[in-house]
Image: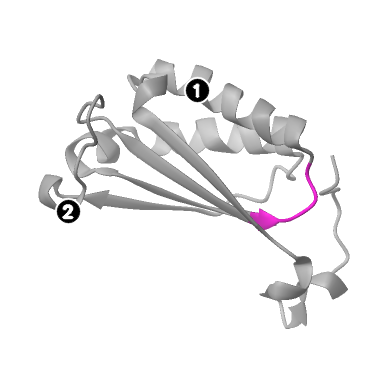
C-alpha cells in the first residue's frame, strides 16, 4: 500500500497534474512493485504565499510525500528517487526542484477495507 501527496504552486502543478500522476505511478509500479491498479495520488496546488520556494529552487518546486508500508530496501527507495528525478524532467521539473520523502509505517498502523493492514492479503511484495 502507498499513498502519494503532491504539493506545488498551483500555476505549475495544475497543468501537469495528469502527467505527473502517470510519472509517479510508473515509478511506483516498476520500482516499488505496486500493482497497476493501485493509484492513490492527491494533489495540493497552492498559492505562492502558501508554498514558499526555498533558496536555489524555482517556482516549479514540488514536494512528493509517499506514505507506504515499511519493508522496501534502501536500494529500492534510492532507485525510486533516481527514477523520479530523471522522469520529472520531461514535465519541466528539474531534479533540484523536486523533493521526495518516503514515510514508512508498520502494516499494523494502517486500517484498510475494515481490517488492520497486517491482516490483509496482499497481491504484491513490500520487502523488495
Give the magenta range. 68-72
Residue furthest out toward the bottom:
114
For the N terminus, the quadrant is bottom right
Residue at the image point whose x is 36% and y is 19% from the top: 94
Which mark is drawn over residue 85? Answer: 1
Question: Is residue 41 shown left or right of residue 79?
Answer: left
Coloration of the structure image: one colour
Classify 10 Å Cα crowding around label 1: few (below 14), some (14-19), many (20 and above): some
Secondary structure type for disc 2 = helix
Label 1, label 2: how many angstroms apart (C-alpha)? 24 Å
Which secondary structure dominates the residues rendered in magenta?
loop
On screen, residue 82 above or below 74:
above
> The C terminus is located in which quarter?
top right
Residue 101 on image: x %, y %: 52, 44
Q: Position of residue 67 (x, y in %)?
A: 59, 56
- Which residue is farthest front? 55
Residue located beneath label 2 in the image:
50
**Secondary element at image label 1:** helix
Amino acid at each position: 500500500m502507498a499513498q502519494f501527496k503532491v504539493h506545488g504552486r498551483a500555476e505549475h502543478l495544475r497543468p501537469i497534474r495528469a502527467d505527473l500522476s502517470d510519472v509517479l505511478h510508473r515509478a511506483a509500479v516498476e520500482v516499488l512493485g505496486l500493482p497497476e491498479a493501485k493509484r492513490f495520488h492527491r494533489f495540493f496546488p497552492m498559492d505562492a504565499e502558501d508554498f514558499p520556494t526555498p533558496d536555489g529552487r524555482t517556482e516549479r518546486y514540488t514536494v512528493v510525500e509517499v506514505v507506504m508500508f515499511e519493508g522496501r530496501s534502501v536500494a529500492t527507495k534510492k532507485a525510486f528517487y533516481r527514477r523520479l528525478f530523471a522522469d520529472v524532467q520531461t514535465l519541466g521539473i528539474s531534479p533540484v526542484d523536486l523533493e521526495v520523502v518516503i514515510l514508512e509505517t508498520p502494516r499494523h498502523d494502517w486500517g484498510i477495507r475494515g481490517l488492520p493492514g497486517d491482516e490483509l492479503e496482499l497481491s504484491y511484495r513490500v520487502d523488495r
